[in-house]
Image: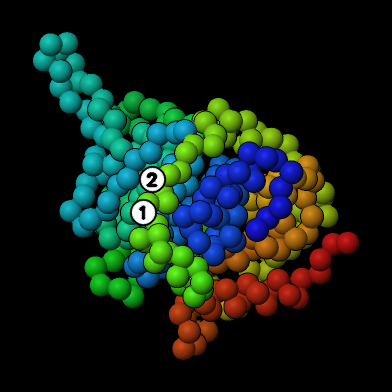
């Protein structure tokens, strides 16, 4: 697990690890996403703990939490809210939807239609929603944790590139190791452990840490290193779509958050290298000319790994 000199961060990691067994790296990446003001996409087969991670993360903070179970018949107004006529005041009033919370669990986001998926675009990019020409700010901090089943499963709608680009990271839970799974069985699936979780931080403390992350120093040589990798994704013949400028910005913020988690006020090359795959893999599109028996997501990660290995690291 990432070592940190911040006692609150250390306590937070330990609190989450009591429920999410044997997934220290996944916990680290989730906290990095929060501190970097990003959003998290968790992709894996059902039953691996995607929803449990999101609920545990929310319980560890004294912040508001809403869960949205996405289905094929949901409408955008079911997510962001709706204007209702108030006969007493003879005017329309906006009734906020479940999106108005600090932590929003978008469960099985790819089971709803693209129209409803698009309801999250403005919220995730600008922390606000616009209804009937009125803009409504969302509470801070604001984090969307979306889970999705693999697109090969029945009843799923693949997320478009514009939606994927809003997520700072895409991670996979993976199956637990044998000892961790034995602990899960002893604890009745983790439900009892989750009930015992108490909040470690409140919203103001999270916002203060996010501000501190933005002040972490990044040397120009590291920016050049990151942009070299970004440029190579755009020039690669194996990729039909490279990393967007938003992707480069989010990698920069993620590296700052990783340095902060380790108790540093400056970034190292490893802060960028360790985040290339979770931050970039869902942003690139593998060319149809690059055929392989592996899944597209695995192909993308292989191409990025090759680019990473052949890019000179600044000393």
- Report the quarter where the N terminus lies: bottom right
Residue ranking furthest to the right: 315
Residue drawn at point x = 77 percent, y = 50 percent: 267
> Residue 163 vs residue 210: left or right?
left
- Report the quarter where the C terminus lies: bottom right
- Does the residue at mark 1 contact the one at mark 2 (Cβ under 8 Å)? yes
Way the structure is coloured: rainbow
Relative to residue 275, is residue 285 depicted above or below? below
> Residue 33 vs residue 273: left or right?
left
The percent coordinates of residue 287 (x first, y second) are 51, 77
Location of residue 35 (image quadrant): top right
Relative to residue 97, is residue 270 depicted above or below? below
Location of residue 6 (image quadrant): top right
Tag shown at residue 195: 2
The secondary structure type at the circle numbered 2 is helix
Q: Circle 2: is it few (<14), some (14-19), or many (20+) Cα within 10 Å?
A: few
Res. 282 in view: no
**Pick the front one: 88 or 161:** 88
Judging by the rendered image, the residue that carries numbered circle 1 is: 191
Q: CA distance from mark 1 to mark 2?
A: 7 Å
């Amino acid at each position: 697990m990432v070592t940190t000199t911040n006692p609150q961060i250390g306590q937070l990691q330990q609190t989450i690890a009591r429920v999410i067994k044997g997934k220290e790296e996944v916990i680290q990446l989730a906290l990095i996403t929060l501190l970097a003001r990003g959003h998290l996409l968790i992709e894996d087969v059902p039953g691996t703990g995607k929803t449990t991670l999101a609920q545990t993360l929310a319980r560890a903070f004294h912040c508001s939490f809403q869960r949205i179970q996405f289905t094929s018949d949901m409408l955008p107004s079911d997510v962001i809210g709706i204007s209702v006529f108030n006969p007493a005041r003879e005017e329309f009033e906006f009734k906020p939807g479940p999106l108005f919370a600090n932590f929003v669990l978008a469960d099985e986001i790819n089971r709803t239609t693209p129209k409803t998926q698009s309801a999250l675009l403005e919220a995730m990019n600008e922390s606000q929603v616009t209804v009937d020409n009125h803009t409504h700010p969302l509470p801070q901090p604001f984090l969307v944790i979306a889970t999705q089943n693999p697109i090969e499963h029945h009843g799923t709608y693949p997320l478009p590139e514009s939606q994927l680009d809003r997520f700072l990271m895409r991670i996979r839970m993976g199956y637990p190791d044998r000892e961790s799974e034995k602990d899960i069985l002893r604890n009745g699936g983790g439900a009892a452990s989750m009930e015992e979780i108490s909040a470690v931080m409140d919203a103001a403390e999270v916002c203060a840490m996010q501000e501190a992350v933005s002040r972490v120093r990044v040397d120009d040589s590291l920016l050049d290193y990151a942009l070299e990798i970004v440029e190579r994704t755009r020039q690669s013949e194996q990729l039909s779509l490279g990393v967007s400028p938003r992707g480069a910005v989010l990698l920069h913020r993620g590296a700052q958050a990783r340095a902060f988690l380790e108790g540093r006020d400056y970034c190292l090359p490893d802060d960028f290298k360790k985040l290339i795959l979770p931050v970039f893999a869902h942003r690139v599109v593998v060319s149809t000319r690059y055929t392989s028996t592996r899944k597209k997501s695995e192909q993308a990660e292989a191409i990025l790994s090759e680019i990473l290995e052949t890019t000179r690291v600044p000393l």
